[in-house]
Amino acid sequence: MLEGYKPWPESLRKYYQETGCWTGETFGGILEKQARDRKDSVVITDGEKSITYQRLDERVNKLAVGFMNLGIEKEDRVVLQLPNTIEFFEVCFALFRIGALPIFALPLHRKMEISYFCEFTEAKAYIIPDVYDNFDYRNLANEINSSIPTLEHTIVAGETERFTSLEKLYIDKQVSFPAITGSDLAFFQLSGGSTGLPKLIPRTHDEYIYSLRKSVEICRLSQDTNFLAVLPVAHNFTMSSPGVFGVIYAGGKIILSKYPSPDVAFPLIEKEKVDFTSLVPPLAIVWLQAQKRTKADLSSLKVIQVGGAKCSAEIAKQIKPAFNCKLQQVFGMAEGLVNYTRLDDDDEVIIHTQGKPMSEYDEIRIVDEEDNELPVGETGQLQARGPYTIIGYFNVEEHNAKAFTSDGFYRTGDVVKLTEEGYLIVEGRDKDQINRGGEKIAAEEVENYILSLPGVHDVAIVSMPDKFLGERSCAFVIKNKEELTVNDIKDFLQHKGIANFKIPDRIEFVDRFPYTALGKVSKKNLRAMIKEKLTQKSY
Ligand code: OOB
């Protein structure tokens, strides 16, 4: 058993098995089954290249042999940072086949995040594209390589001189792969986080596949589904709600869009007769605008999901008439619980709520500051427990004691209200996080980086309202060197190598912070201050 991973207690394992939630299926098993059932049907296309279920299974076997030859074994951690490409799936399923554990980094992660993932998990390999979106990942790998002693291999999908070429790892040889069971770990997702660095979310085959099965059922995916992946497939939403893995579970087809912009995505919708896709709210706004002028035929669309951040009723209202398809709101979290509005719900519910839990085995409660359960209709903090909600992050025992209740509920940090019909309305958040159009920023993580810059005495980062992204980030900084400028701080963060979306959108210099009665920096007051300032500027 992997050190730092706390497995499900035997009693719960039994319970979820006996209730039929956990079936012992594995990702490897699912692909093998679909290779038999769906043989020559295309599983993934990027609009140019396509691959069938059977061919994917064959390529996965070959790559699994290549990984084994490199010495990658069951439970070895592998940081995977590939964009929406066919290789992503080949690598992913090859790792599943040998029981190695991918850590799903996002394409936007940079040196600070990647070196942390590698170091924290003692990763053996790091897998990257050569160049994607004008960024050369080999340079990033060069910087990281020397500093991580456990990292034995950097593998590049594409051109490489210095590193191992992915293409050369497909080896045609019969070998026996290690036995994998449903209760084995499959991979790590990343938490949006609110304290310090991102936490790692361990997922077993059993729990994740259960969430796929339920999602496929609720979203009515089938072999006829043509799912367009525009957001990064490494993110939990695009991966599993029902996402690309849901499509594979259903035997449908995945269409990969290199970019989410309408000029790339709309022609793909027309060409591939896309019927299902997932968006974050800012992207929904862009698509709504573009739809008015497009010549592309979008009539195949049946469902557009919007999730990852609150979709205002204003935007939600426009989706159905504009695209002549259903809207589904998705309120989920990489830690587990996913809520969907149902496809046949009334427009009122679809527009004004963020859905209800996908499973009858999900347990949710809404509590006050002292963990007392609140009556229906009152606003409070959401806690969740269930067959696909984790019971602890990887290797952070102290943090787990705070993030989970003693009876195993996950404290989501979301502030919600329950309707009489059992639907959730997200009202806000009591975690120290900024949700920048679906991209999560842990305030403390960025504060710590900024604090390490000479000339900075103190810093506090809060969200500020934004019409397009919902929220952007604003850093209030107390400086102790007069010459320090906004650009100095931004350049410093850029050079340090953090994901671009974490760099504060705005920096305000102040002489002191407002404090709460308990002597803590009052982020509430800081949020009010910046909101006020933006309003004055006729924002
Ligand atoms: C998804 O996962 P994460 O882990 O990136 O972020 C989770 C957090 C939630 O706790 C909540 O604060 C926020 O993102 N959120 C929403 C929301 N969907 C997510 N807030 C308001 N309305 C929504 N519809 O973002 C994620 C994972 C699986 C499916 C969908 C989204």
Image: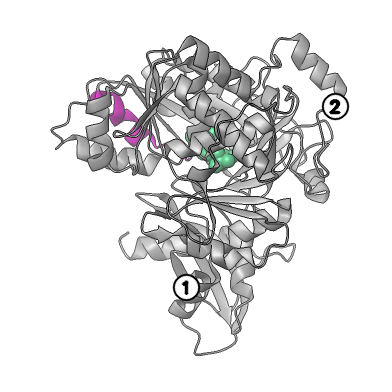
List the single residue furthest toward the front: 173
| Image position, residue 355 (x, y; %) | 51, 24
Q: Nearer the viewer, residue 517 or 231?
A: 231
Q: Give the number of the disc on residue 9.
A: 2
The amino acid type, in three-letter code, at marker 2 is Pro
Where residue 268 appears, as percent x and y from the top left, is 26, 32
Q: Badge 1: few (under 14), some or many (20 or more) residues near its Cα, within 10 Å?
A: some
Residue shown at the point (71%, 24%) measured from the top left: 386
Front in this rendered view, residue 172 or 337: 172
Is 500 a magenta residue?
A: no
For ligand 1, tell me if the residue under mark 2 lies within 8 Å: no
Give the answer, above or below, for where 421 lies relative to 267: above
Vertically, is 499 above or below 421?
below
Label 2 Cα neighbours within 10 Å, binned few <14 / some 14-19 / many ≥20: few
Quarter of the rendering containing residue 288: top left
Q: Is residue 423 visible?
A: no
Q: Is residue 409 visible?
A: yes
Viewer-closest of 2 and 408: 2
Query: Which stretch appears magenta?
Result: 309-323
Q: Is residue 102 left or right of residue 467?
A: right
- Residue beneath disc 1: 490
- Residue 17 locus on image (x, y percent): 76, 13
- The mark nearer the N terminus, 2 or 1, is 2
Task: Residue 4 in the image: state x and y as whole percent.
Answer: 81, 44
The label shown at residue 42 is none
Residue at disc 1, CB closer than 8 Å to ligand 1: no
Q: Secondary structure at mark 2?
A: loop
Q: CA distance from mark 2 to mark 1?
A: 46 Å
Give amino acid for label 1. Lys
